Amino acid sequence: MPLLAYAFQERLLFFPQPLSEARRAEVRQRFPSVAEVFIESAGRKLHGWHVQAGPDAPLALYFGGNAEEVSWMIEASAQVPGVSWLLTDYRGYGLSEGEPGEAALVADALAWYDRFAPQAKRVYAFGRSLGSGVAVQLAAARPLQGVLLVTPYDSIAAVAKHHYWYLPVDLLLKHRFDSIARAPAMKQPLLCLIAAEDEVIPPEHAERLFAAWGGPKRKIVLQAAGHGSVDSHPLYWPSVREFLTARVQ
């Protein structure tokens, strides 16, 4: 069993979601002002959507969950007017080429930042679930005005030990996303949204990361919210909007 877990761990951690041509056409028709964007990173073509709110608008770089194709966020972004969004598809997700992995996803996040951040006065990283680990590593490597983490974890290793307590996780895991090791050195403001009934990433993992964060921080525990329903909580979008549109962090 440990050998199988090691060999197939990418299938346990990453669940690539394609972008069909029908969905792509629907997005183009419904949201003609949203730009479809491509960049290259390490020889792979990456795909995303750029929702533009104006020259002085802050930019939120969005990194989604492990089974998320990000085009749904185009409509959801209307909940936060006055903010531009760069919605990025991981390697193997949407129309992005390649295979997902920790090093690749972080390198791609840096490439997205380097391409689009110079156009914005304020840039934020927004990471949900799996994407929280990508957002933290981006924040450790590039200047940001803030970091917004939704249902985050202290490390993938810690979460894996919770679910696969019978396996030698530390020996097997290649993609560790060790956010808590980086957290004490972080100086950027943090907003941490925690689902109180999270069945995928138990809330204590987010609490540990929050406690270790070195910069200004605020957490909101969304009562009765689960891992997949967190964005339906009545406090979710107002909290996101307040954090991303504040002039002084």
Image: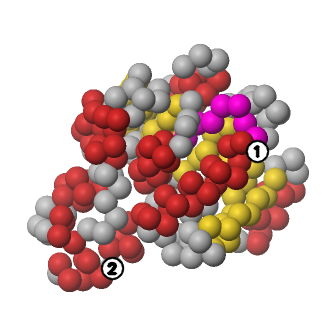
> Looking at the rendered structure, which numbered label has been put on residue 8?
2
Give, as a single range, the part of the protein colored magenta: 119-125
Residue drawn at x 68%, y 37% as measured from the top left: 59
The total of numbered circles placed on residues is 2
Residue drawn at x 63%, y 75% as measured from the top left: 43
- The correct choice, above or below, for 238 with respect to 183 in the image is above
**In the rendering, at what x and y percent does residue 128 appear?**
48, 46
Give the SS element for disc 2. Answer: loop
Residue 232 seen in render: no
Horizontal side of 69 relative to 47 (left or right) equals left
Kind of residue at badge 2: Phe
Horizontal side of 35 relative to 127 (left or right) equals right
**In the rendering, at what x and y percent does residue 14 appear?**
43, 67
Residue drawn at x 81%, y 53% as measured from the top left: 35
For disc 1, the marked residue is 51
- The correct choice, above or below, for 4 with respect to 183 in the image is below
- Judge whether residue 235 is colored magenta: no
Kind of residue at badge 1: Val
Q: Nearer the viewer, residue 170 or 229?
A: 170
On-image quarter of the C terminus = top right
Marks 2 & 1, CB-CB < 8 Å contact: no
Residue 125 seen in render: yes
**In the rendering, at what x and y percent does residue 71 appear?**
68, 55
User: Which comes before the other along the chain, label 2 or label 1?
Assistant: 2
Residue drawn at x 70%, y 52% as measured from the top left: 115
